Amino acid sequence: MFASLAFPLAAQDVAPAPAIETTAPAPGIPAVAEPAAVAGSDLPMVETGLAGHDLSPWGMFMAADYVVKSVMVGLLTASIVTLIIWVAKSLQLSGARRRAYKALREVLKAESLDSVAAVMANRPGLGAMLVKAAAEEVEMSSDLIGRVDPTGIKERVSSRLNRIEVAAGRKISQSLGILASVGSVGPFVGLFGTVWGIMNAFVGIAETQTTNLAVVAPGIAEALLATAFGLVAAIPAVVIYNAFARSVTGYRQVLADVSAGIERLVSRDLDRSALAIARGPTALAAE
């Protein structure tokens, strides 16, 4: 009896477990791949290459090659020099032009060279210098007035005034050559810095053996910053140079008007002296 009862129990114990059915993915629906690693695993993270780069202008300057840094410092110095020349030359031209216009007004309303020389005796400026030079030349030729053709005296006065004008124009144009040089050379100097920086960027690509933009971009940005410095130095220099060139031309025209007015006064005085001598001592004494 016990044997008959044990056998069914043993048969039940060794009966195979039912198979677990696996659900196959439906056709057309891709199987979802399991993640290769879960959060918190020890797999290395892939760096982007931008975390260690400061992409601000100052950061790119500090990270640039020494040649590119030298180019940037030189262009920055040129910009500062341009600013100094702009301020100094603006004050110089403004004062010189104002004094020249005052001298022109005095010369145009004067009736003789002696009268305008007396008015402008103690005044500063180039106009007073022109009047004084003409008066000195006429005084040096006073013994020839009425005895020879006055054309020679007029030519000597004109020559002396012309030399003063040329010297004044040369002096007022000083430092403009620096602006012209900065305006013409600045972009090329910046381009040199850019070419040098890009060369270094390609060398870095070869050393790291990667074309990842995150690795290449900082070096190229540093190189292009040199071109930006060149444009910042050149554009204001060109604009300021053109403005000063027009101002200097206008100033020279005012000086030419002053000289022409002085020459007219000299010519008028010589004609009066010749007329007085032609009338004779009696007429001269009556006058």
Image (cartoon, rainbow, N blue to C red):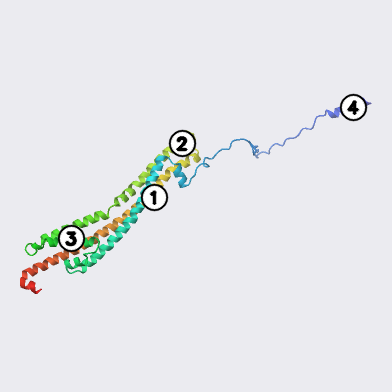
Mark number displayed over residue 133: 3
The residue depicted at 37 percent of the width and 48 percent of the height is 77
Q: Which residue is mark 4?
A: 6
Judged left or right of residue 138, residue 124 is right
Pointer 3 or 2: first along the chain: 3
| Disc number lying in front (1 or 4) | 1
Q: Quadrant of residue 240?
A: bottom left
Q: Amino acid at mark 1?
A: Val
- Quadrant where the N terminus sits is top right
Q: Amino acid at mark 3?
A: Ala
Q: Residue furthest top?
A: 3
Q: In the rendered image of this protein, does residue 31 appear above or below residue 116?
A: above
Identify which amino acid the numbered label 4 is placed on: Ala
* For discs 3 and 4, the disc positioned in front in the rendered view: 3
In three-dimensional space, the C-alpha distance between marks 1 and 2, rounded to whole angstroms, equals 28 Å
Q: How many marks?
A: 4
Nearer to us: label 3 or label 2: 3
Q: Is 61 located above or below residue 242 in the figure?
A: above
Q: State which mark lies toward you, 3 or 1.
A: 3
Identify the residue under disc 2. 204
**Which residue in the structure is indicated by mark 1?**
232
Q: Give how far apart the Cα atoms at labels 3 and 2 are.
A: 70 Å
